[in-house]
Amino acid sequence: MSEKLLPCPFCGGNKISVWDKSRYDVCVRCDKCDAQTDWLPTISDAITAWNNRTQPNEPLTLEQQKRMDGEPMWTVTNGVEGSGRWEIVDSVNDKYIRLCNPADESYDCESDTYGKTWLAYRNKVDEGVE
């Protein structure tokens, strides 16, 4: 086993074991809290699954949005519960970000209002988190 195992993402434990149930079933398991990966065909697959961590879903910067032409992002109007929705970045310039929603409606959001009246994320934000 050449790849180092990261600590447990749930309890932070460092005693991590590779379980080899049979020639074709391998998982990685935390000896402290018993969290484990699915049973996978190879040790390498199990280690990769264990070490894979979800990236934080921080609000996107305007610079990140400028590089997202044609990509979806989750937008939220600040202070309006339930306002989150998927939108596609249609175009970006210094003053506006043009967004298109699933109903094929396009509209411009002023760049200087970003962070004040609205935010955008790479992934959907759970209600009450924004």
Image (cartoon, rainbow, N blue to C red):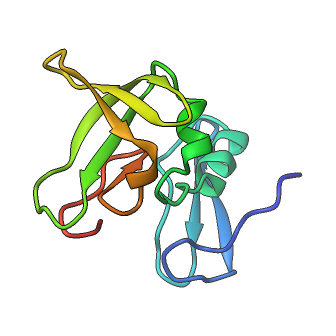
Above or below — where is 98 with respect to 120? Answer: above
The x and y percentages for residue 106 are: 25, 20
Q: Quadrant of residue 75?
A: top left
**As rendered, which of 34 and 76 lies closer to the eye?**
76
Give the farthest residue toward the top: 104
Which residue is depicted at the point 55% across and 71% down?
9
Which residue is depicted at the point 45% across and 44% down?
111
The x and y percentages for residue 60 are: 50, 50
Q: Indicate left or right for 125 with 94 as reference.
A: left
Q: Indicate left or right for 109 with 24 as reference.
A: left
Q: Quadrant of residue 64?
A: top right
Which residue is depicted at the point 46% across and 69% down?
35
The x and y percentages for residue 54 are: 52, 55
Q: Quadrant of residue 109?
A: top left
**As rendered, which of 122 and 10 lies closer to the eye?**
122
Give the farthest residue toward the right: 2
The x and y percentages for residue 80 are: 13, 61
Query: The C terminus lies in which quarter of the figure?
Result: bottom left
Which residue is depicted at the point 19% across and 21% down?
102
Counting every numbered tag in the picture gives: 0
**As rendered, which of 73 and 11 lies closer to the eye?**
73
